[in-house]
Amino acid sequence: MNLVNCTIEQLTDLVGNTGITRLYRIGIDYPGETLNVIFAETGDYPIIDQYPAQAFVSRVDMETREISYNKKDPLAIVFYPAIMKQQHSGFPVGETFLNIGTLLHELTHVKQVFSGRLEMLGWLKMNWEGVYHEIEMKGYLAYPWEKEACMEQLEWITRGNSLMAELHYKALVDSSLAL
């Protein structure tokens, strides 16, 4: 596993020790796969900047740091720490708690890609379990790969309360459909 453009201390500051443990678990579950963790300022990846993403998973050309859809390029989680802090500054739960939720969401996508269930084909083009999808941002959270990732995150936030997680997920989908 490569930690690109960051240190272990920076990652620990962002997500806490539980997040680090989960990152190392990826290496155990998918030996031989490389997961890159990049801390970026908005503007580093203009393809995503129009949306207020806290983090996203993509393939990245590590020399140019450009988004790639080449399966040979390594997988990366790209974090926008400034957006994470900005979006959750007024939330009553501690920032680290929510950042771990974001990390769990993105690690779910990493597992989906490493296991072959999710394949990124291009900007707004995905294969999910063999079915091709041209993605629309309106209602994006209703896609099955997003539901799985959101539920992982919401189960963490609700401390395992599946019913509460489902209610939060439904509210998220409803708001994403209203965009």
Image (tube, rainbow, N blue to C red):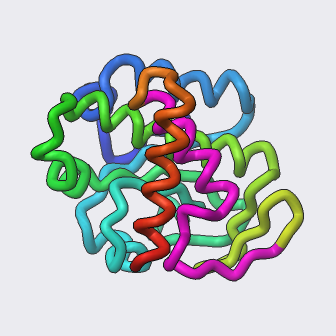
Is residue 18 placed above or below 129 in the rendered structure? Answer: above
Estimate the x, y position of residue 110 in percent, counting from the top left.
62, 45
Estimate the x, y position of residue 123 in percent, counting from the top left.
59, 80
Estimate the x, y position of residue 155 in percent, counting from the top left.
50, 31
What residue is shown at x 69% (from left), y 39% (from top)?
A: 33
Foreground of the two, 139 or 146: 139
Magenta-drawn segment: 132-156
Foreground of the two, 143 or 8: 143
Estimate the x, y position of residue 82 in percent, counting from the top left.
18, 54
Foreground of the two, 94 or 72: 94
What residue is shown at x 30% (from left), y 57% (from top)?
A: 40
What residue is shown at x 60% (from left), y 63% (from top)?
A: 142
Q: In the rendered view of the protein, which quadrant contains the N terminus?
A: top right
What residue is shown at x 42% (from left), y 77% (from top)?
A: 178
Count of marks overlaid on the render: 0
Q: In the rendered view of the protein, which quadrant contains the C terminus?
A: bottom left
Main SS type for the magenta part? helix
Is residue 78 placed above or below 137 in the rendered structure? Answer: above
